[in-house]
Amino acid sequence: MKDINSNIVRAGLLGLAVGDALGVPLEFKHRDYFIEHEVKDMLGYGTHHQPPGTWSDDSSLSFCLAESLCGGYHLKEIANKFILWLEKGYWTAYGTVFDIGISTSAALHRYKENGDPYHCGAYLESENGNGSLMRILPLCFYLHGKNIKEDEKFSLISEISGITHTHIRSVICCYIYIDFCLFLLEGKTLQEAYLSVCKLKEKYRAIVDEKEWKVLHKILSGDIETIASEKIQSEGYVVYTLEAALYCLLTTGSYKEAVLKAVNLGYDTDTTACVVGGPAGLYYGLENIPESWRAQLARKEDIEELADSLHRACYEMKV
């Protein structure tokens, strides 16, 4: 297993948060808007009236997951932290929740009622938003550092996604994304990591039915980077988000280019850039996340401390 230092974990968490913050002011903007208003730097206010460097629910729930994993794997503890975020503004940029997905909100309210993290997530086909994909990245450090085996890996991904999104389509997208990030942690390039994921087709095929398999065709095509940009959609549907993220990562040459490309796709700008920013941070490294963007990031030092704690829990503490 490749040695992972704390800066790699920092790069993952800061990478996703910076991407998220870049997208927050532009969320819901139509793609045509960016033809004349291309985003080239960190902005503020806009859609949610938040200052530059403010991250959203994507990062908040990622940080809740990361913090929970510092104490080991306990699904109810993860769900409880999500409730703290919802009700108390825990792990928000400035103490207030200003953005939450419909399925995530409904699932967390169900959890408050039944107290069962295994039976609260959205399960309908129409509820496959990107609300679990956007927050799953911290799990890759736990899986990698603890050398979790394949069967248990899928179970953990299913359970963590399932707090809010239980449908197999959301779960399999998280599974593919986590595998992609794990290949990056093993030292593969972005292209190598993507092709390695595509070589695992039979593993994914064994989990889903024919209908779900067809949905994954573009993701696992092996050449998603060759698709014309106008064919890449960037709304809040989980499949679109994963497609857009892989496309942005594979058609750019730096962290900055990748997350800006994600934002300039429009629509669900914060989540697409967040899902791009995490693996882009892992691959390009902390030093290649623009320093001026990191400096503007809300609670930067807290995120760094969290990353260091997660590194210690996953890579230094023996089980």
Image: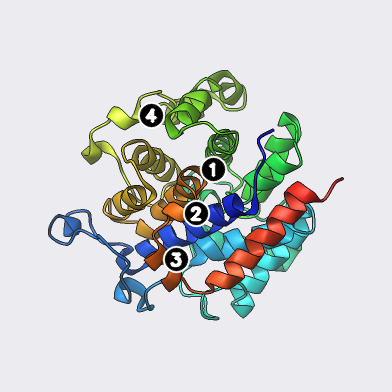
Nearest to viewer (mark 2 / mark 1): 2
Vertical comparison of 296 with 217: above or below:
below
Q: How far is disc 3 from disc 1 in space, using C-alphas?
A: 30 Å
Q: Residue furthest front?
A: 287
Residue 230 appearing in the image: yes
**Residue hosting label 2:** 286
Numbered mark located on residue 218 in the image: 4
| Tag 1 near tag 4, CB within 8 Å | no
Q: Residue at x 49, y 49 (%)?
A: 285
Q: Residue furthest right?
A: 319
Q: Amino acid at mark 2?
A: Leu
Q: Callout 2: few (<14), some (14-19), or many (20+) C-alpha neighbours within 10 Å?
A: many
Nearest to viewer (mark 1 / mark 4): 4
Which quadrant is home to the C terminus? top right
Q: Where residue 139 sits in the image (x, y, percent)?
A: 65, 48
**Residue hosting label 3:** 294
Badge 1 or badge 4: first in the primary sequence: 1
Q: How far is disc 2 from disc 3 in space, using C-alphas?
A: 10 Å
**Residue hosting label 1:** 170
Badge 3 or badge 4: first in the primary sequence: 4
Q: Residue at x 54, y 37 (%)?
A: 184
Q: Is residue 33 left or right of residue 118?
A: left
Q: Is residue 87 left or right of residue 77?
A: left
Vertical comparison of 106 with 206: above or below:
below
Residue situated in front as seen by the camera: 119 or 304: 304
Label 1, secondary structure: give it: helix
